[in-house]
Amino acid sequence: MLRLLIQFLSLSLSCAKLRSTSKFKSFFNLLSAMATYSMDKMKTRGGGREIDRYRRFCRKCERRVQRDEGGRGISDFVINSELEKIGKAVAQAKNVAILTGFPCNIDHDIPQETDGPPGAVAIARACQALGIQVSIYTDDVNYAVVQAAAKGENYSIDVQSFPPAIKWGSIEEKRIRDILATVDHVISIERSGPGIDGRYYTMEARDMTPLLAPLERLVEEARRESILTTGIGDGGNEIGMGKVREQIINSNVKFAEKIACRIPTDFLLTCSVSNWGGYAVALAIGAAGAIEGRNSNRMAMVPTPEEEIELIKRMVQAGARTQ
């Protein structure tokens, strides 16, 4: 099992930029096999053994996605055993809000990268398979790309966008309150978060603030109202990283003191690539649902290779940047 897990996650390095379609397909075929294996094991026998299997499965997934493949220094701010908590908590939710959007290519009219939306969609599809209501929220400038990711041949996920902070008013404030009145879990994946100075930075410390809606408000207000929150990120400047901000500042991450996000979340999955974290969370949600007998379809856990290739192609056609 572990050997198979390591194999399929190792193949995923080239996925985000579609550098190798054959490796991409191999990755998702193996991911699908792992999903099927996982759910079959979660559903068999009783006496608490399925809980132990779930915990081991999540821990193996977590260890692999937390490898510092890019050499950014993330090992200094990894928290262990978060994935199993995330999977259980989300599987028990009734309405989930997912935040994504990282317009780091600020010199382009459409600055959104390919990391983030695919992982958000994978999480959303896992939620839908368990009957959980879910919507994805992003910035106006990223809307076309995120919308392209969220509308596939066999699925459709609600996507809503917000304007940048300078254009916020009473309408946006009411929208935030309305969302918080219905959700019981807020997930942020590859979502830019403000540094200690309140501004949003790329990994190279370039200022993205004029492009971004202050969607961290959803996380901050959710925590005040005891609504669970999850952060998924790969660099230290994403929502959720406030939970390990001191570790980020003391790590090898460049410009850490300036770019490190100040917003914490209840759970935090630090990973090599945020999309990988999204796939891992989708697996954990599906596995947690299988324990409860709520799902027996491996498609609740992972997309097919063809679906994910088409998703990223749609994003690129909508203007997403791959570099």
Image: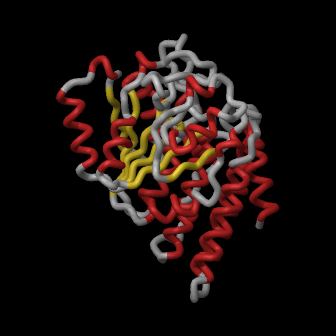
Q: Please tell me which residue is depicted at 52% across the width and 68% down the height of the picture.
A: 288
Q: In the image, 128: left or right of 26?
A: left
Q: How many marks?
A: 0
Specify whether residue 316 is in view.
no
Give 202 or 100, whichever is nearer the viewer. 202
| Colour pattern | secondary structure
Residue 181 position, x and y percent, is 23, 50
Residue 56 position, x and y percent, is 68, 69
Q: In the image, 222: left or right of 29?
A: left
Q: In the image, 304: left or right of 123?
A: right
**Residue 321 position (above or below residue 63):** above
**Residue 226 position (above or below residue 50):** above
Q: Quadrant of residue 177?
A: top left
* Image quarter in which the N terminus is found: bottom right
Specify whether residue 321 is in view.
yes
Q: Please tell me which residue is depicted at 62% across the width and 24% down the height of the picture.
A: 203
Q: Please tell me which residue is depicted at 58% across the width and 45% down the height of the picture.
A: 307
Q: Please tell me which residue is depicted at 53% across the width and 22% down the height of the picture.
A: 201
Give 107 or 198, whichever is nearer the viewer. 198
Q: Quadrant of residue 74?
A: top right
* Image quarter in which the C terminus is found: top right
Residue 204 position, x and y percent, is 63, 19
In this view, the residue farthest toward the top is 107
